[in-house]
Every structure is written in structure tokens, then in C-alpha cells.
Image (cartoon, rainbow, N blue to C red):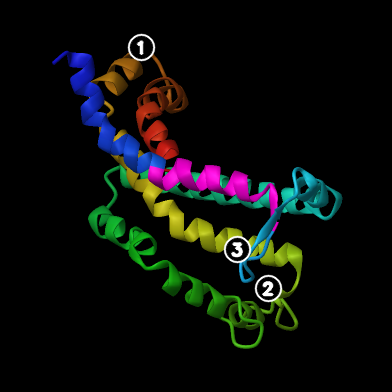
Amino acid sequence: MKDRTFGFLLTLPALALLGAVVLYPLVGSLSTSLFNQSLVLPGRSFAGLDNFKEVLQRNFWPVLEHTVVFTVGSTVVPVVIGFALALALNTKLRGRAVLRGLFLMPWVIPGVVVSFVWLWIFNANYGLLNGLLVQLHLVDEPIVWLGSPGTAMAAIIVAKSWASFPWIMVMLLAGLQTVPHALHEAAALDGAGAVNRFWHVTLPHLRGSSASWCCSR
């Protein structure tokens, strides 16, 4: 058997799983979008592109704007937090082993539990956040965080970022620990400061970790 054929056979189970989990639902969704049908009642009729026209003529652009805001916010915020914590935990910080375990807690907690915790935090009547703000005299009365589009979007981004930053932190921390210390010493001897060493030594070695994180997303 040729190496190319043998390699294809080794990847065949993964390709079959990818097709069953990703490609088949994608093709099925595209096919369903061309018909008028109910999820409850049987039967359907061909609609062509009428469904797409109806979506574009209704509230498509506000929904797209909200989707972009949520996607950018829930990506940038955990990356910034995870990167900052990875840099801090990569130093000789006292108790960093304990801190690594504590920062991983949001990642291992089930999503249902995380949802209920943040619903309690943002609750307008007895939520923790409103209680702290009132006690600190930062607000005069409780805020209905989930009652308006702006604050609700911010609350969802905060909750999503809190649950996802540990994964980013672990990936980047693993990449930081692979950076040879000799490169930093050589750059320092050549007169490079901390900022230059970060941009020209640390960041290039994090490309693999960043790519792995992007693929996992």
C-alpha cells in the first residue's frame, strides 16, 4: 500500500466524523432554507429564495450588528484577560500554582451552573452586583441589567468571557513556557528592552498556541 493511500485511510475516520457532525447538518440547513415548512406540522412547499428576502427585509441589520458586537466582545475580552493572566503566571509569582487552579474553575464549571450564577449576579432585585454598587454608593437604586439591550449585551459578554478566558490562559501559558530563556538573555545582552523582547521574542513563539486556540474555537 502506498504511503498516500495509507495516510488517507488513517484520516478517513476523522473525515467521516467531520462530515457527519459539520457537513451533513450544514447541507441539511441550506436545503431546508429553500422550503416553507413547520417544525410541528408535516409537509412543506418550495419557496426558493423567498425566505432569504424576508429575512433581509425585516430586522436583519440590527440582528447582524448585535451578532458582530457579541462576537467581537466575547472574543477580545477573554483574550486580553487570558493573555494578561498567562503573562503574570509565567513569572515567579508567589502561589502561582494555587492561582492556576483557581483561575481554571470557570472553565470546569458546567455551563448551566455558570448561567444561573450570572443570572443571580445580574438580578435586579437581589443580585450581587447591584448590592455592591448600592453599598459603595455608586448607584442610587438597583439597575435592571437584563432589562435593556445595551446592558444585557454587556452582561452576556461578561458572563461568556468569564467562562472562556481560562482556556485561552492555559493555551498561552503553555506557549510562554516553551520560549527558550536563552533567547531572552541574548536579546537583553544585545540591548533589547522588555518591550522589544516581548514583541520580537515572546510573541513569535506564541503563534502556534494562538493557531491552536483559533482552531479550537
Provide the residue span drawn in magenta: 20-36
Classify residue 185 as left or right of residue 134. left
Q: Residue furthest bottom?
A: 125
Q: Going from the N terminus, do you reach mark 1 or mark 3 first?
A: 3
Q: Secondary structure at mark 1?
A: loop
Residue 209 visible (yes or no): yes
Q: Position of residue 19 (x, y in %)?
A: 40, 40
Q: Position of residue 41 (x, y in %)?
A: 64, 70
The amino acid marked with disc number 1 is Asp
**Residue depth check, mark 1 versus mark 2: number of the one nearer the observer:** 2
Q: Nearer the viewer, residue 107 or 132?
A: 107
The amino acid marked with disc number 3 is Ile
Q: Position of residue 67 (x, y in %)?
A: 67, 51
Image quadrant in which the C terminus is located: top left
- Number of residues whose C-alpha sits closer than 10 Å to that of mark 3, classed few (under 14), some (14–19) or many (20 or more): many
The amino acid marked with disc number 2 is Leu
